Amino acid sequence: MEKKRKVEIKKIKDTAVGFPAIKSTGSRVLENMKLKEGLQTLFKLNQVEGCDCPSCAWPDPDPDDRSKIAEYCENGAKAIAWEATRKTIGPAFFEEYSVEELREKSNHWLEKQGRLTTPMVLREGAAHYEEISWKRAFELMAEQLNSLDSPDEAIFYTSGRSSNEAAFMYQNFVRQFGTNNLPDCSNMCHEASGKALGETTGIGKASVTLNDIQEADVLMIIGQNPGTNAPRMLTELQKLKKNGGKIIAVNPMPEAGFMGFRHPQKPWEWLGKPTKLQDLYLQVEINGDVALMKAIIKILHEEDKKSGGTIFDHDFIRNHTDGYDELMASLENESLAALIKASGVSADKVHEAAAMIRDNKKIIIAWAMGITQHKNGEDTIREFVNLLLLKGSIGKTGAGTLPVRGHSNVQGDRTMGIWEQMPDAFLDRLGKAFDFDPPRKHGVAAVDAVKAMAENKAKFFLGLGGNFTLATPDTNLVFEAMQKCELTAHISTKLNRSHVVHGKQALILPCLGRTEIDETSRGRQFVTTEDTAGRIRMSQGNLEPASEHLKSEPSIICGLAEATLNGKSNTDWAAYAEDYNLIRDKIEEVIDGFEDYNTRIQQPGGFYLPNGAREGRFETDNGKAHLTVNPVPNNEIAPGHFILMTMRSHDQFNTTIYGYSDRYRGIENSREVIMMNRNDMEELGLEAKDYVDITSYFNGEERSITDFQVVPYDISEGCIGMYFPEGNVLVAIDNKSPESLCPSSKFVEVSIQPSAS
């Protein structure tokens, strides 16, 4: 086991980006790539004829507005350098290290070894992975799949890094095989957004474009840290500020990105005062957001009554919504004082927020996993929609909903059919396009996939990208579940924890990265993705592949489909593997909004998919947006216990750990820490860097981790923060939303004790 790292605590930053971000970017690129190829790749990143960033799904500016040299952020550059590293690992590496030895390595170490170059197999009972041909790898998976008692005994996971083309052919293969078991990363992150928005506005996506942000009068950003998770967002927030807009930041802990921003491409901003982005910071208690929104709406409701109806947009409410009377009646029964107390925010700041919203209609509410990963995440999002609808702030310039997606094509995956419960209309068109009868029984989402494997109801697992073992909650149960499978296989660019926590047999299937040239017998291919704002864009790599043995994701999927469905499918899988235009023709045939796909995607900047809410149309059951009544959650926990939320550090993207520096939070050299309010530390007699054990509680079950160090932090009293995925050990598999099944990783009841050691 690697030596335990000790935390170093430094000053918390009050400014984001600027020269330190440029320095960090340069060092990571030079660490992994040659200078010339690094610069060439970065100059191509997010350009019209370049490579789409494989990290977050933040929208690109219109073609004429893009920086010609640096349309990327620090974390995007890290992702590119991490993928395009010169380091490679092949058969000799796996001869040197047994799987048992690899299990003892850190997650950071595993991925840092380099790009996977050759298909590898771990035979049952073997200690080492060994090389295998692609043909035999496909045959091995096909044999296992065709030996199952039911197609539902197979799990097919997708991460947000796959392209539209790969995702579409993947779900097509899986459904031709006979199951809807298509869990994906959205199940664990943004499922609540799709659920709540789909019900209330008719579409589970953002109703704003990138250009809307700078036009807003007020932007509320809630449960999101763009300085780390979507740094390019800060540029748009700066534009909003320069246009006179206001920003309300809502979070249990302050984040540097809101306090000060220095534009990395403007050296004159690196000195002097940075741009202060947040005009008002509301330090809400964890899961106090429903109460906060209700309090603001109640204040506005009272002022609307007093003013004779001048605060809310009653014409909009009357013509475009339903549920108004029920919502207002419910507000009459709420105590404003109780709501404010439940939010954890002081009364004067709640009133200040209401005053900022009162006289404006161009309002955007943005949020991320600080909202979605709760048992009541959907209720919170429905309250966001309530406020926007009451103000008439959907379907107009500078106003609307903005769920900030985390991974580059997680939204595109869903559009392509990666979902365990796609509607019949989609399945009908898919079946017609490929001449088969798709299964109609709903499949399993991510958390239920874990339970199915743990209960021996699923025996095969295939991951299209990602690191399922660490991305899911209840880590120990996930490890147990994966090890019960007959075969686990992963389509990957780099080694990760999921390769060393495996089934009785395991396969590593190395694929091309997004930065690499994808050449087939039909010429150079490109792929497409969908950003947070619903724009479809093309992506084409410029680097030589890390190995001659790599295959593209579409090629791997089609190869597996051909081997598995041999004689049982009318699809010419080999043709689709060679020519992605054919895939896009079929996408056009199956999915609305992709008309003339192969022509329109060639236009600079791509094209937007239809979006009813953005256009002022609500494609709900009655054609109106729904105002809803949502309960204030019961956040009571046992005396002496705390509420834990998990989060990313600045040196990671999802489960990929680039290093041990959370620069903005001043936490260095270790990830095994908890962030804790000083008053709570004093109550427990703890000092900075003390070691503690943490135990979580859910439905009578306990889960524990030991020897984490305490870091004093400005976080709401009674709340603590911990990094993901380390904190996943404490999240019970059943601690999830009953609606979207999204894990409640942002609300875990825990106790803290000094470590025995």
Image (cartoon, rainbow, N blue to C red):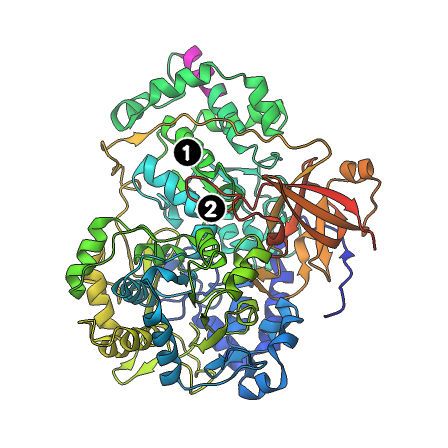
Image quadrant where residue 413 sits: bottom left
Q: Main secondary structure of the magenta part?
A: helix
Q: Nearer the viewer, mark 1 or mark 2?
A: 2
Q: Is residue 164 something one can see in this rendering?
A: yes
Front residue of 481 and 724: 481
**Dot 2 crowding, Cα within 10 Å, few <14, some 14–19, many 20+:** many
Reading the image, the residue beneath label 1 is 382
Spot occupied by residue 485 in the image (x, y as percentages of width and height): 47, 66
> In front: 316, or 15?
316
**Residue drawn at x 59%, y 67% as measured from the top left:** 25
Q: Which residue is mark 2?
A: 742
| Left or right position of 205 against 375 | left
Which of pointers 1 and 2 lies earlier in the amino acid sequence?
A: 1
Amino acid found under the numbered disc labelled 2: Cys
Disc assigned to residue 301: none
Q: Residue at x 76, y 64 (%)?
A: 4
Q: Is residue 511 above or below residue 401?
A: below
Q: Is residue 37 left or right of residue 590?
A: right
Q: Please name the amino acid that badge 1 sits on.
A: Arg
Q: Which quadrant of the rendered structure holds the N terminus? A: bottom right
Check the image and report above or below for 420 versus 328. below
**Residue 451 located within the stretch drawn in magenta:** no
Q: Which residues are magenta?
A: 299-307
What's the distance in space between the residues labelled 1 and 2, CA to CA?
A: 16 Å
